Image (cartoon, grey):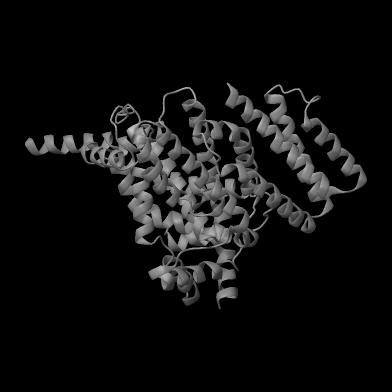
Amino acid sequence: MDDIQKQFQKDARGVHLLSSEKEAIKQRIVGIPIPKEYRTPVFSLSYFDFFHAGRMAVAALLVCIFGAAPLTYAAQHSAPGDTLYHFELYVVESIEAAFKFSSDAQIAYSADRLEERLQEIRETAHAEVSAEEIAIVVENIEQHAQNVLSALEVDTTEEIFDDIVRASALLSAHEDLVAEVSQEETRIANFNDVVATELQEQLTEYADEATSLELLEEIQETMSETSDVLEENNFETSTTDIAALLTSVEKEITNGDLIQALQEATEAKIQAFVQEYSEQAEE
Amino acid sequence: MDEQCQILRYSVSMKADPRVQFERDYEEYSDAIFRFLYYKLQNRERALELAHDVFLRFFEYLSAGKEIEHTKTFLYRSAMNAFINEIRTKKGLTSLEEISEAGHEFVDDGDNAEELAAQREAVERARSLEDPYRSALLLRYVDDMAVREIAEIMETRENTVSVWLKRGVEQIRKKYG
């Protein structure tokens, strides 16, 4: 091996994980519960009349007694009103979020949490959950909505774009329900207005740089995804706004206005998701 | 006899708790897998995430009681698949340079600024080497793998790996010299 090869070898051997990164990844993985052996039921101590601080203290005590791994599993499957729900929101989520290094991963994580929280909100609508607990869920929803929104200012890869569309549709579909269960005006009502404006700007920016062929492909893909959502849910397309939007997209393509076509195709996709999530919310 | 029982008990407990094997192999291969991904992706954050995913998959395999015959090959193949998957899902990103440009390195350098800068410099310097030559060189001269092992990981013939190594060395001389 000559000196130049040795230099390559020396350079490469200097590339490694920082000790903090190495330890953090290991702890994150070994903290995952192993099936069967360690699986534990979800605890519910909701009859205790104390909130946040008290419950966190109980959660901390349980960590000391039983260890972190089974608790993490249990917390991830807890619901508003369970003691471990606070542990999930304030501890598990913080740890999980710390392992999302790229903006793509951070936004996908927040969009997933939004979906999970809204699902919980739907379930709590039929259960006896206190106003304090609801407020905590709504606060978490607002926090994740804010994270998703912040992504628009930082970056817009295709994955981020899809997550923002999903988040926007989720919040639109649940806006009334969240306002109803929380019995107050929430900040998420403003979310979609901001997203709509930002999306429009980002789409125009993207379209300015893309070739006509790329734009056409993007439009086709967006329309195909919209059709998939409609078909999967057996939605009647003839009577909805979505049908009108899809017709308009075709018209814009014929007129050669591909930017407008892409914006309308995106709007149709959001509407299709809104319809899908709205039906879920009503069930 | 007592000693034999103790060894037997130890070996049984080793088999029962996948964490023991995981921690041992993680210690041995985590840096190499991370480096392999960092050189391929040219993006530290994504390399960290994919390395995490590779070891998570490894841990899940162990936890499910599945037998892994060659840990090293399993981990590198997982890393290779994670990389291919990354390229496929990044629509429109056709080269490593473009991925890097779109990846936005935003590491909080903090106290490790110098170390991270040196790592970044090493990875960027190797960018001038074409893949698969770069990966083959890395596995051969940095991870000390045999040509046979590299061929297995990169799913090709040993002769092809030998050619890659030869061409890779020529490129190193040309571009590092």
Most extreme residue toward the right is A255
Q: In this view, does B6 lie to the left or right of A240?
A: left
What is the quadrant of the N terminus of chain B in the image?
top left
Is A30 on the left or on the right of A145, as rendered?
Answer: left
- Residue B152 in percent (x, y) is at 50, 47
Q: In which quarter of the image is residue B129?
A: bottom right
Instruction: Name the foreground residue: B127 vs B50.
Output: B50
Residue at 88% from the left image edge and 43% from the top image edge: A252
Residue drawn at x 79%, y 50% is A214
Q: In terms of depth relative to the viewer, which is nearer, B153 or A119?
A: A119
The answer to whether residue A149 is seen in the rendering is yes
A16 lies above or below A150: below
Q: In the displayed structure, does residue A24 sit left or right of residue B16?
A: right
In screen coordinates, is A14 left or right of B94? Answer: left
Residue beneath the point at 57% across and 50% down: A104
Please determine whether, in this image, residue A73 is positioned above or below residue A101: above
x and y, in percent, of residue A131 in the image? 43, 33
| Residue at image point 66% right, 33% down | A274
Of residues A156 and B176, the one nearer the viewer is A156
